[in-house]
């Protein structure tokens, strides 16, 4: 199995990443750090604990407080997309049954990394503040991480800033993102799922139907309601008519191929290898934009693996299967 640490900011699409991390048969979730991002760190922590409670996983997955604010810039949340709570749109989220673990996420991640002996992937579905802080404080860990799989950035599209050229997770802490993308050891271990890829993974009305099933499952109804809210804000604020892009769980798909669990005939993963840099000049109209600074041959092992396409039906089937497992749990 693939050992994973998840740093997230739930978040409607983060909730699906938590679901898949908990219930995909190829993944073993070692712990979660809940960081500021879509909402305040208090809210994302509450949402994480509440989701785990809904899954019956509250006693199994250790949850820590992640990064509380960006490195340099002022904090900005995304209530326009996720509501004030970060997970608006449902009344079915239970009160968390289990507390978070007091203590530093940096040390908790350090333990998880060392215990998995070079085989761990850190999955980042929020800003890169937690990951960058970990690697800044404990640079020796860079060598012990197999991959860092990141939802963030856009090569040809954006969803924030005046030019619509930046993606939220990167824009919300461009300095931390630069630290990760420009690090000589780390960059070659990064797997990026940018908007170019995640905008193909839409929760269409057909997807919603499968999620809801016959309507008798509370967990299915919870996700259904979250998807409807997400669809509404994505339609009104971003003009997505066919359904909202469910970005964050996409980060797990390339891992199934990279760890050899499935062939690329199944995943149909198309990627390029790039060096990236983030515009972190606060006066720039492209503030937060990810810029390609170097391209490498496709089969090279240098540069960030930037995902551009996957088999979308396969992706949704992974989500549906995880939900079916969760329902029985
Ligand atoms: C990213 O920003 C957040 O709003 C989502 O959860 C996702 O991680 C998409 O730009
Ligand atoms: Ca997110």
Image (cartoon, rainbow, N blue to C red):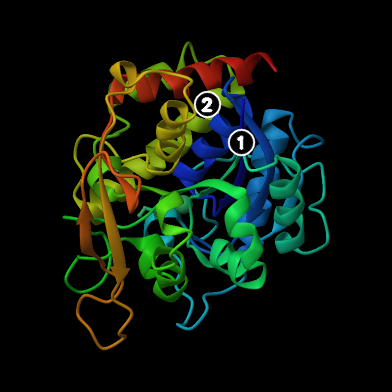
Residues tagged 1 and 2 counted as in contact (Cβ below 8 A)? yes
Report the front residue among 230 and 308.
308
Tag on residue 221?
A: 2
Q: Percent from the top left, x then y, of residue 114?
A: 73, 48
Answer left or right for 178 relative to 105.
left
Q: Is residue 289 above or below residue 205?
A: below
Q: Is 37 placed above or below 307 here?
A: below
Q: Position of residue 308 (x, y in %)?
A: 24, 41
Label 1 crowd bin: few (<14), some (14–19), many (20+), radius 10 Å: some
The one of 137 and 80 positioned closer to us in this rendering: 137
In the picture, residue 230 is in which quadrant? top left
Q: Residue at x 38, y 23 (%)?
A: 316
Numbered badge on residue 92: 1
103 sits to left or right of 179: right
Instruction: Report x, y in % for residue 171.
Output: 36, 69
> Circle 2 sits in a helix, a strand or a loop, which is it?
helix
Quadrant, the N terminus: top right
103 up-or-down from 286: above or below? above
Q: Residue 287, how many percent across, how many down?
A: 27, 76
């Amino acid at each position: 199995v693939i050992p994973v640490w998840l740093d997230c900011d739930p978040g409607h699409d983060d909730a699906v990443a938590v679901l898949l991390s908990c219930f995909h048969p190829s993944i073993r979730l070692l712990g979660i750090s809940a960081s500021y991002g879509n909402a305040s760190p208090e809210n994302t922590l509450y949402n994480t604990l509440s989701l785990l409670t809904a899954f019956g996983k509250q006693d199994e997955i250790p949850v820590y407080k992640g990064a509380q604010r960006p490195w340099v810039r002022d904090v900005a949340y995304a209530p326009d997309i996720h509501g004030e709570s970060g997970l608006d749109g449902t009344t079915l989220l239970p009160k968390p049954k289990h507390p978070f673990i007091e203590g530093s996420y940096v040390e908790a991640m350090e333990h998880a990394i060392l215990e998995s002996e070079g085989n761990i992937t850190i999955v980042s579905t929020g800003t890169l503040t937690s990951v960058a802080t970990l690697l800044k404080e404990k640079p020796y860990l860079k060598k012990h991480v197999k991959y860092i799989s990141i939802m963030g950035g856009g090569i040809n599209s954006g969803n924030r800033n005046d030019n619509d050229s930046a993606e939220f997770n990167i824009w919300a802490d461009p300095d931390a993102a630069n630290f990760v993308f420009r690090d000589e050891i780390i960059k070659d271990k990064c797997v990026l799922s940018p908007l170019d890829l995640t905008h193909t993974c839409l929760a269409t009305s057909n997807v919603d139907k499968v999620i809801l099933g016959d309507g008798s499952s509370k967990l299915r109804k919870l996700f259904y309601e979250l998807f409807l809210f997400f669809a509404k804000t994505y339609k009104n604020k971003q003009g997505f008519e066919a359904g909202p892009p469910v970005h964050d769980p996409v980060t797990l798909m390339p891992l199934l191929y990279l760890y050899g669990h499935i062939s690329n005939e199944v995943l149909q993963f198309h990627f390029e290898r790039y060096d990236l840099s983030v515009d972190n000049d606060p006066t720039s109209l492209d503030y937060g934009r990810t810029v390609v600074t170097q391209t490498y041959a496709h089969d090279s092992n240098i540069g960030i693996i930037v995902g551009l396409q996957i088999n979308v039906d396969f992706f949704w089937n992974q989500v549906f299967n995880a939900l079916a497992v969760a329902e029985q749990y």
